Amino acid sequence: MIGALCRRGEAIVYPGRGGAVGSKTANDMEELDLEFAQAPKSRTAFVVVLLTLAAFTFSYLGAFCVPEALASQNIITRWQPGHDPRPHWMAISFVALTVLFCGSGVTARIMSWRQLRRIDSMADE
């Protein structure tokens, strides 16, 4: 199958490597790796913003949209004007979801740290 696709005697050329396979030395490859290596960007702030937006969205949906849909179908009674509990529900659910998301993140970091420590101890043996 491969013989039908490639003519005999030709070398496969990979993009970015120049010549045939193995034409670059290990030092050349290390220099290229060091030249194009970039420090990984920190995504912590982006993740925190996303989790905050998710907590806000879920708390809004749970505090305003679901009770409104239930009240419009007469499943629950409407509240008295001036005694709307929904902003309070939204604040409580926002704080609860934010704490839940932060707790999940801390738990994941602790588990990752413990696993990496275990891997390092295996490498030291």
Image (spheres, grey):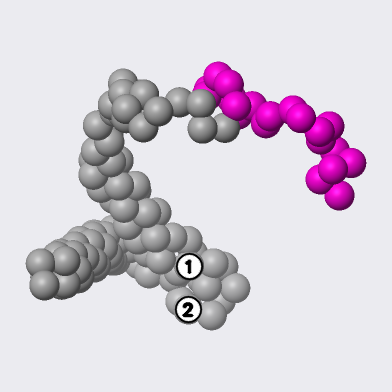
User: Residue 2 appears at what percent x and percent y?
Assistant: 81, 45
Badge 1 crowding class, 10 Å Cα cut-off, few under 14, some 14 to 19, many 20 or more, is few
Residue in the foreground of this view, choosing between 83 and 118: 118
Marks 2, 1: nearer the viewer: 1
Residue at x-position 64% and y-position 27%: 13
Amino acid of disc 1: Val
Using the image, determine if residue 47 lies above or below residue 10.
below
Q: Residue 107 colored magenta?
A: no
Using the image, determine if residue 67 lies above or below residue 2.
below
Question: Is label 2 in a helix, a strand or a loop?
Answer: loop
Q: Quadrant of the C terminus?
A: bottom left
Q: How many marks?
A: 2
The residue tagged 2 is 76
Magenta span of residues: 1-20
Residue at x-position 24% and y-position 38%: 42
Residue at x-position 32% and y-position 27%: 27
The reply to whether residue 61 is visible in this rendering is yes
User: Residue 58 appears at what percent x and percent y?
Assistant: 39, 60
Residue in the foreground of this view, choosing between 105 and 60: 105
- In the picture, the disc for residue 66 is 1
Amino acid of disc 2: Ile
Residue in the foreground of this view, choosing between 113 and 60: 113
Q: Is 19 left, or right, of 88 in this rendering?
A: right
User: Residue 90 appears at what percent x and percent y?
Assistant: 30, 61
Residue in the foreground of this view, choosing between 20 and 111: 20
User: Residue 81 appears at what percent x and percent y?
Assistant: 34, 60
Q: Main secondary structure of the magenta part?
A: loop
Q: CA distance from mark 2 to mark 1?
A: 11 Å
Residue at x-position 38% and y-position 69%: 79
